[in-house]
Image (tube, helix red, strand yellow):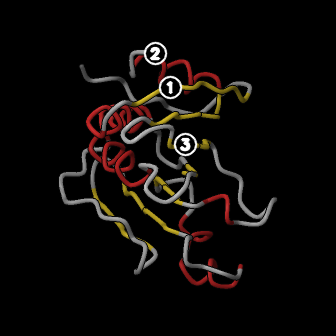
Amino acid sequence: MKTERLNNLNGEITEWTAVSCSPDRTLSMGEAFGLLLPAGSTVSFQGGLGSGKTCFIKGVCSGLGIRSEVLSPSFILVEEYKGDLNVLHFDLYRLEELGDVYETGLFDAADGRNIILVEWGDRLPDGTFDFDIIVEIEIVGEKLRDFRFMGPENFINCLKEAAGG
């Protein structure tokens, strides 16, 4: 089922929690998420190593029409993908200073046209960057993950419906 992409992110900030019991479920939730993202969206992904951030982002990119392989940009810091919308996928895990983040181009890329996906967005100092949506992922079992989505009410409500929650 193809979901209509949201035109904007409106409403009070709200949250929703969901559970994934497998990498396939994480990918499908990510795809539903990507199908909704409007141009200019900025998303922070937070969670420990191996929590499923990159797996979820692979699904997001699929929902955004990206057919190329999606990899974690841990060592190159940023990957760019062309799909329905231009996607910039950042990984801030290895960065230690705010100056390092400026060098990645993150702040310049948030121009209202690109989709910005940031792994380890919580490593940025408070007040440095305002994300539209925050996705927290917690490992609760070998394949079990708790997802907490925080964002505008219209997005969260559409995501609940699209992801089967």
The amino acid at mark 3 is Glu
Task: Give whichever of discs 1 and 2 has the lower sequence position.
Answer: 1
| Relative horizontal placement of residue 137, taking residue 29 as reference (left or right) | right
Looking at the picture, how far across and down is residue 33, in whole percent? 42, 34
- Report the Cα–Cα distance between label 1 and label 3: 11 Å
The residue wearing badge 3 is: 138
SS of the residue at dot 1?
strand
The amino acid at mark 1 is Ala
Within-10-Å neighbours for mark 1: few <14, some 14–19, many 20+: some
The quadrant of the picture occupied by the N terminus is top left
Q: Residue at x 31, y 31 (%)?
A: 25
Establish if 122 lies above or below 51: below
Q: Residue at x 67, y 58 (%)?
A: 122
CB of mark 1 within 8 Å of CB of mark 2? yes
Q: Residue at x 39, y 22 (%)?
A: 163
Q: Nearer the viewer, residue 80 or 100?
A: 100
Within-10-Å neighbours for mark 3: few <14, some 14–19, many 20+: some
Task: Give whichever of discs 3 and 2 has the lower sequence position.
Answer: 3
Looking at the picture, how far across and down is residue 114, in whole percent? 46, 56
| Mark sitting on residue 18 | 1
The residue wearing badge 2 is: 165
SS of the residue at dot 3?
strand
Q: Residue at x 60, y 79 (%)?
A: 95
Q: Of tags 1 and 3, which is closer to the observer?
A: 3
